[in-house]
């Protein structure tokens, strides 16, 4: 197991509008400082990562997260009673796999700035509007009652690849992103949006892993 | 427009800080020219519950075509046919097709971490220059009522000048009498009221709520439009000039296009997914008039992975005939006339001696100039 230690500044994390591009990085030893590095609790009771969805139109929704990942590598997936897959499922990730997953998720979060992403979207929209030769070419889009993707992270330290910047004590942070899927379709040129969509797809894919066993049965 | 109920109008998709507060959004096919729009709604054949949802879709299209406000329009428990713990798919369809044809929520709605609980029932607004929503239900404690205090939040809910009741009839909505401007509220009113069920109770209308109000629960039948919904549509139908009775006015006819593998020609497509609950994704374009957008693509998605959907299987108008009329005509044989809404006779209609006519409809009218010499039977019910 590799040790990954880097003291990093606390990172403000907002995920409502951003989509990050990043490539998964594996944990590497300290003698390769250019690689991304991460430190996290290995306690079984520490939740490192969670993902879920809130649907505003649905009054009586069970808002338990779909996916929770803990320090010992345990992955807990929950489907509410009204789902065709109702029940709890779990599996375990190895330390390396857990590190890889967290690095994959943490890297885009590192530089996230909600206001900056909001401005990027406005800038792109304005650019498209100014490039139009007539009013009818200006397209707007909207998703009513769009699901809200909710991410939560709890990472102790993180240093992205090739960066001298360090983050320390990255406390639990929630990020809410309304209409992430539609943003990804409509803003292909904004890398942060695409990155977050990839994170979401990654986590949804994990929640459907064939290694999962119902009611806590281990593989 | 006899029989139509006008009230405060709600709010429109795309209206807000980005596109403009006065945006009015029109359904697919509207380009500024008046007339009747044909809006085709199709079910993607890949949708998991395609066959089961057909009745709900047909009934909802009929409801939208009727464009008539209903009060009460909320039915619970023994007053509906929805099994306990189930969510009515037809009610979801009405709400989401409202979005697909240009309407937005009249209330703020839920926003994770920002707008929750009772605050979701406050009237639709921006968050104002201070980028912070003001949550204050006023002295009456009813969220979304006329005494709410909303600081600099900019109102997006249309209402009749001098009238702030989204539950009652008012004259034809158009720019001369409909506004978002809070300065046009009745004296002592602070903010535009929306048609939530709780505002309805406060104003004397029980179990009545705008179909476009965000938030659907189990065991709720909300399959009919309310006055606020109808008024919002009527306002849009005044066209680009926002004046009723001019050449750019339109109506629409929702048409069921069937279950199709190729939905490319459909104006609204219904599909299933395994995420979310229900939503409508729309694309629109600006029309050649300030503050007007027309939808050019709409997709209603629902989560087919959920087990609580109740798919209504009772078709409201199996005949497919809404209205019949007979004039300048003589019947001297046996005739059976049936319609789901109304049948009118005359002028110059004769049931001759030896003729026998049976008319079955909720409403049967014999206008002047109708003569009965034979047998004429009226059955005032849905056929």
Image (cartoon, coloured by chain):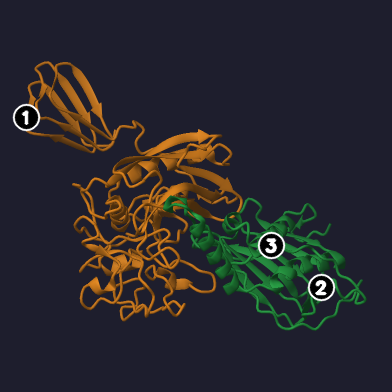
Q: Which chain is green?
A: A
In depth, the one of B187 and B179 nearer the eye is: B179
The percent position of residue B270, horizontal first and vertical second, equals: 50, 44
> What element does badge 1 sit on?
loop
Query: Which mark is nearer the camera, 3 or 1?
Result: 3
In depth, the one of A110 and B314 nearer the eye is: A110
**Residue A162, labelled with which disc?**
2
**Residue A195, labelled with which disc?**
3
Color of chain B here? orange
Residues at discs 2 and 3 in contact (Cβ within 8 Å): no
**Quadrant into which the N terminus of chain A falls:** bottom right
Residue that appears at 75% across and 67% down: A69
Q: Does A157 sit left or right of B122 as displayed?
A: right
> What element does badge 3 sit on?
helix
Identify residue for label 1: B369
What subunit carries mark 3?
A
């Amino acid at each position: 197991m590799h040790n990954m230690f880097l003291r990093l500044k606390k990172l403000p994390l907002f995920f409502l509008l951003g989509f990050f591009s990043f490539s998964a990085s594996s944990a590497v030893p300290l003698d390769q400082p250019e690689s991304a590095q991460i430190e996290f609790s290995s306690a079984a009771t520490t939740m490192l990562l969670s993902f879920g969805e809130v649907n505003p139109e649905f009054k009586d929704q069970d808002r338990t997260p779909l996916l929770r990942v803990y320090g010992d590598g345990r992955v807990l997936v929950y489907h509410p009673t009204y789902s065709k897959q109702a029940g709890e499922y779990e599996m375990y990730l190895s330390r390396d796999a857990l590190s890889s997953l967290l690095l994959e998720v943490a890297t885009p979060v590192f530089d996230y700035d909600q206001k900056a992403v909001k401005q990027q979207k406005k800038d792109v929209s304005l650019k498209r509007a100014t490039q139009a030769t007539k009013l009818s070419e200006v397209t707007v889009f909207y998703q009513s009652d769009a699901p809200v993707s909710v991410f939560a992270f709890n990472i102790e330290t993180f240093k992205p690849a090739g960066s001298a910047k360090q983050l320390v004590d990255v406390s639990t942070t929630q990020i809410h992103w309304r209409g992430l899927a539609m943003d990804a379709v409509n803003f292909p040129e904004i890398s942060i949006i695409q990155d977050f969509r990839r994170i979401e797809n990654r986590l949804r894919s994990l929640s459907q892993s064939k290694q999962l066993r119902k009611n806590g049965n281990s593989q | 427009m006899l029989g139509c109920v006008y009230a405060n109008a709600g709010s429109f998709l795309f209206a807000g800080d980005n596109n403009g507060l006065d945006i009015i959004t029109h359904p697919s096919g509207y380009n500024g020219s008046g007339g009747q729009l044909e809006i085709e709604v199709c079910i993607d054949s890949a949708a998991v519950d395609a066959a089961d949802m057909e009745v709900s879709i047909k009934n909802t299209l009929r409801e939208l075509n009727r464009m008539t406000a209903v009060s009460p329009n909320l039915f619970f428990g023994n007053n509906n046919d929805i099994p306990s713990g189930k969510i009515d798919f037809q009610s979801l369809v009405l709400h989401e097709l409202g979005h697909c044809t240009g309407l937005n929520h009249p209330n703020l709605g839920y926003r994770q971490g920002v707008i929750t609980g009772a605050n979701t029932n406050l009237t639709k607004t921006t968050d104002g220059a201070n980028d912070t929503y003001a949550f204050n239900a006023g002295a009456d404690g009813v969220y979304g009522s006329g005494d709410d205090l909303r600081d600099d939040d900019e109102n997006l809910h249309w209402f009749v000048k001098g009238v702030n009741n989204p539950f009652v009839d008012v004259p034809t909505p158009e720019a001369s009498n409909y506004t978002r401007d809070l300065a046009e509220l009745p004296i002592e009113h602070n903010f535009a009221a929306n048609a939530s069920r709780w505002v309805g109770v406060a104003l004397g209308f029980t179990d009545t709520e705008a179909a476009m109000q965000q938030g659907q629960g189990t065991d709720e039948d909300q399959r009919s439009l309310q006055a606020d919904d109808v008024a919002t549509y009527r306002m849009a139908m005044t066209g680009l000039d926002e004046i009723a009775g001019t050449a750019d006015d339109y109506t629409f006819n929702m048409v069921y296009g069937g279950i199709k593998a190729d939905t490319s020609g459909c104006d609204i497509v219904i599909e299933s997914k395994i995420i979310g609950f229900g939503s409508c994704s729309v694309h629109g374009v600006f029309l050649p008039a300030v503050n007007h957008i027309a939808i050019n693509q709409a997709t209603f998605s629902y989560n087919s992975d959920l087990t609580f959907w109740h798919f209504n299987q009772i078709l409201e108008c199996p005949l497919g005939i809404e209205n019949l009329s007979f004039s300048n005509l003589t019947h001297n044989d046996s005739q059976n006339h049936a319609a789901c809404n109304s049948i009118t006779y005359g002028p110059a209609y004769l049931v001759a001696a030896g003729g026998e006519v049976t008319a079955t409809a909720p409403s049967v009218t014999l206008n002047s100039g109708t003569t009965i010499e034979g047998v004429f039977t009226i059955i005032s019910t849905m056929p």
